[in-house]
Image: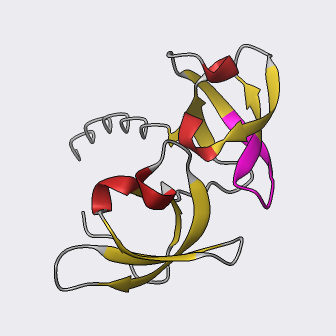
Amino acid sequence: MALRVGAAVEARHAGGEMWFPGTLAAANDDGTYDVHYDDGDAERGVDAALIMEVVSFSTGAVVEARHGSGSLYYPGRVVRAHGDNTYDVDYDDGDKEQGVRWTLLKHAPAEPAEPAEPAEPAE
């Protein structure tokens, strides 16, 4: 999937291990991107593998989240969105968690629709 110019992203500045928030400023002909970081820094020619487009969730969104930054996802609902791309989540089992990073959330799969009952034949 191609990244969108103007999108909110997190990128690994200078190929380091840490992710920093920013905006995708340009898509280059060689397949790299230019990133303007939220702290005022900028970087040109960033490989796509070092960039993640931020996924947003609205309050009330049904999600699956990795509770406690663990490896398993649990069903829940976003109850508050923060400006730093973290969210407060109320889990279906009654547990609650605040400040969950967006990278630990995913939209819950849509429930399959119940099959409609066959119509009664007209008499």
At a point 55% along the width and 50% down the height, the residue shown is: 19
Is residue 105 something that shows in the picture?
Answer: no
Q: Count the marks.
A: 0
x%, y% of residue 92?
Answer: 69, 21
- Image position of 95 with respect to 51: above or below: above
The residue sitting at the left extreme is 30
Look at the image and tell me in which quarter the C terminus lies. top left
Give residue 76's quadrant in the image.
Answer: top right
Is residue 77 something that shows in the picture?
Answer: yes
**Numbered range of the magenta stretch:** 77-87
Give residue 115's quadrant in the image.
Answer: top left
At a point 76% along the width and 57% down the height, the residue shown is: 84
At a point 37% along the width and 34% down the height, the residue shown is: 114
Q: Main secondary structure of the magenta part?
A: strand
Look at the image and tell me in which quarter the N terminus lies. bottom left
- Image position of 24 with respect to 95: above or below: below
